[in-house]
């Protein structure tokens, strides 16, 4: 009997164990997502607005000054440039143009850039020579005969190096192509050689290089503003000036006072566009690119428009009694040779610099016969 009960008990234990084996396994909890690093940025909601760029908060006001009158192409190009930069940067870089000598011009304009002001100017290259001497040599007298020759030199490594040196001095050159013809002697005299100008007083600009060149041409220079020049001609203080066709046809109608143009073409009428280097470095790259594109476009635009307009201006001047005459260019070239030595002595340029420039011009002429 005891054996029988023991067998019954053993069978019950077996059935119990089988029932436990058939039970479904307990569900394991889902694996928890990996914990994000403590410094990981929080994900923005899908519909969150993009964060505003720092460039969108940038704004600067820049004053732009030069001496030119509304009838001159430099004035028109400057006005166009200021409006274009302001528009294309959507007002983030606002340029206000002041022409007609309203604000500082010439050397004073360059000084304001060096001093780090929010300042833009358009001046002839020799006015930078107090900082980098070779800047005067690039417009040495009798060096160029066409805009194309000048442009070729301006696009050279030689000029690029000058611009890099000027940047170190606080002057950022934006473009070098703001040209409006060539400067010739304008008087009521018959001038074909340098000796024809001996003893005659002509208006000169405030540029020492221009004054020295006019002296080399045979005249006695009297520096003054061009607005003063017209009154000085009327009163007999000076007998004329040196300038481009657009100058003769420009504000105040100089052609009513002087009627004879001796085609010396001794200097290219050009200006370099510049801005304070400190100001430039404060501008985001996005807007720097726009400014550079506008600067180059307006420089070439001025050259093209001036070339197209010059024939019309000459025709108008001829109708008003102005005449042109050829000169002995070799004699004027020889007369201007001492100016090269003066640039070397005055500004610390070099004969090697002059040889490099004349070599570039010769290279262009050889490749474009």
Image (tube, helix red, strand yellow):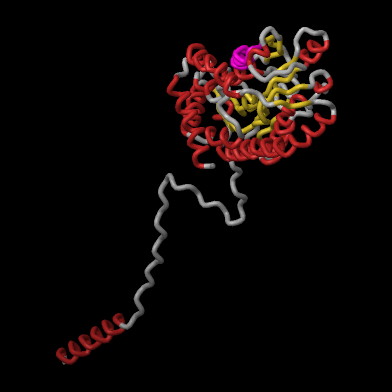
* Magenta-drawn segment: 207-219
Q: At 68% from the left edge and 28% from the top edge, which residue is drawn?
A: 61
Is residue 34 visible to us here? yes
Give how far across and how far down residue 200 sits, in percent.
70, 9
Secondary structure character of the magenta stretch overall: helix
Asked if residue 211 is among those painted magenta in the image, a careful observer would answer yes
Q: At 73% from the left edge and 28% from the top edge, which residue is drawn?
A: 245
> Quick check: 170 above or below 212?
below
Residue toward you, 339 or 6: 339
Q: At 30% from the left edge and 80% from the top edge, which residue is drawn?
A: 20
Q: Is residue 37 left or right of residue 358?
A: left
Q: Identify the image quadrant of the N terminus.
A: bottom left
Give how far across and how far down residue 227 sits, in percent.
78, 16
Q: Identify the image quadrant of the C terminus.
A: top right
Q: Is residue 225 left or right of residue 321?
A: left
Give how far across and how far down residue 233 sits, in percent.
79, 12
> Quick check: 361 above or below 132?
below
Asked if residue 134 is among those painted magenta in the image, a careful observer would answer no
Q: At 24% from the left edge and 83% from the top edge, which residue is drawn?
A: 13
> Quick check: 212 above or below 154?
above
Residue toward you, 253 or 157: 253
List the single residue furthest toward the left: 3
């Amino acid at each position: 009997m005891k054996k029988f009960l023991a067998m019954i008990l053993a069978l019950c234990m077996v059935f119990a164990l089988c029932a436990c084996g058939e039970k479904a396994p307990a569900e394991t909890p889902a694996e928890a997502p990996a914990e994000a690093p403590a410094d990981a940025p929080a994900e923005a909601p899908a519909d969150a607005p993009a964060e505003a760029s720092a460039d969108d908060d940038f704004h600067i006001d820049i004053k732009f000054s030069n001496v030119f009158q509304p009838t001159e192409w430099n004035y028109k190009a400057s006005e166009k440039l200021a409006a274009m930069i302001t528009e294309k940067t959507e007002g983030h870089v606002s340029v206000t143009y002041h022409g007609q000598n309203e604000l500082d011009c010439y050397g004073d304009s360059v000084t304001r850039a060096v001093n780090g002001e929010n300042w833009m100017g358009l001046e002839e290259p020799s006015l930078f020579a107090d900082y980098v001497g070779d800047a005067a040599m690039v417009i040495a007298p009798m060096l160029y005969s066409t805009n194309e020759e000048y442009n070729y030199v301006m696009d050279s490594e030689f000029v690029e190096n000058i611009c890099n040196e000027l940047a170190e001095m606080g002057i950022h050159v934006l473009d070098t192509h703001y040209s409006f013809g060539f400067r010739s002697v304008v008087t009521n005299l018959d001038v074909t050689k340098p000796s024809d100008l001996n003893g005659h007083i002509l208006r000169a600009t405030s540029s020492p290089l221009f004054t020295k060149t006019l002296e080399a041409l045979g005249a006695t220079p009297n520096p003054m503003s061009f607005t003063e020049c017209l009154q000085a001609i009327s009163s007999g203080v000076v007998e004329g000036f040196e300038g481009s066709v657009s100058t003769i046809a420009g504000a105040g109608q100089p052609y009513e006072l002087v009627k004879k143009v001796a085609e010396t073409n001794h200097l290219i009428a050009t200006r370099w566009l510049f801005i304070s280097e400190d100001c430039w470095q404060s501008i985001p790259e996005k807007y720097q690119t726009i400014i550079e594109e506008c600067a180059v476009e307006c420089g070439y635009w001025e050259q093209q428009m001036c070339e197209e307009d010059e024939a019309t201006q000459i025709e108008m001047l001829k109708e008003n009694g102005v005449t042109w005459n050829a000169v002995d260019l070799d004699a004027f070239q020889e007369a201007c040779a001492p100016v090269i030595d003066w640039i070397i002595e005055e500004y610390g340029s070099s004969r090697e610099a002059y040889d490099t420039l004349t070599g570039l011009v010769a290279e262009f002429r050889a490749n474009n016969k």
